[in-house]
Image (cartoon, rainbow, N blue to C red):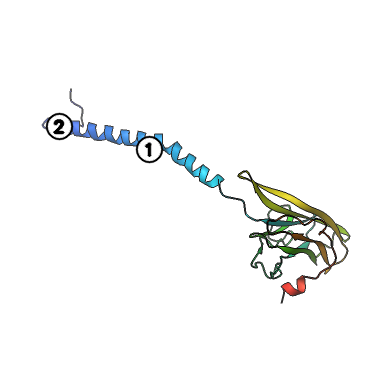
Amino acid sequence: MLSPYEDPMNPGDTLFRDVLSLALLGFLAVIVLLLPHIVTEGKEEVSTVSPSGDVVVELTWPSHMDADMDLWVRAPGDITVGYSNKGGKIFNLLRDDLGKTLDLSSINHESAYSRGFAKGEYTVNVHAYRLDPRYPPPFTVEIVVSTKTTAEGAVRVVPIIFTRAQIRHQGQELTLARFELTERGELVEGSIHSLFKPLRQDGIK
């Protein structure tokens, strides 16, 4: 008995449809077999990309506070980088955290990343732009400075400085760390100190 789709006057038409269907199924099977290899190659390419930032500076303050602390950084021979000037030749400010304003995360955090290592002194400051009236000072802010190193093909971000400071009033600017790096990003022994060096005024000109 003939199928309702078969033409009794042209049996070759049915054969053509069958061959075409088998060819399409074969083509789909080849694509399915090749797909895992294509995805694997893509993963390998992504894994060879180095993480951003040769020098990473991170500032945090208490997460329960709706306070706006500003990170200011300066690399050797570069301009001051902060909220009003987010990029220089070496550093870029990645985020200007306004506290709870327009912030879906519970973390109060700002960070700056460098492109490459500049030999000389780096300066890291914090400025208390706006305090939370519900939580009057003093309160603690923290910074972590890390550098990116590559050894035996593996890339690591290594913290080299961790320090805390007390914010005591609105408008206060503190130098949290001054330190020197070599052209290879190595910390110069004995170079870390926190002698005050104003940055904000230079940054907002």
Crowd class of label 2 (few under 14; some 14 to 19; many from 20; radius 10 Å): few
Residue 188 in view of the camera = yes
Q: From what the image shows, is residue 143 above or below residue 12?
A: below
Q: On the rendered image, what quadrant is the C terminus found in? A: bottom right
Which residue was labeled with disc 1?
31
Q: Position of residue 198 (x, y in %)?
A: 80, 71
Q: Is residue 135 above or below residue 149?
A: below
Q: Residue at coordinates 80% horizontally, 55% vertically from top-left?
A: 189
Of labels 2 and 1, earlier in sequence is 2
Residue at image coords 55%, 46%: 48
Quadrant containing the N terminus in the rendered view = top left
Amino acid type assigned to the residue bearing label 2 in the image: Gly
Callout 1 amino acid:
Ile
Work out whether residue 6 or residue 41 is closer to the camera in this orientation and state it. 41
Q: Which of the two discs, 2 and 1, sits closer to the camera?
A: 1
Q: Residue furthest top?
A: 1
> Does residue 62 appear in this view?
no
In the image, which disc is placed on residue 21? none
Kindly identify the residue that appears in the image at 22 percent across and 34 percent down: 17
Tag shown at residue 12: 2
Residue 188: x, y in percent? 77, 57
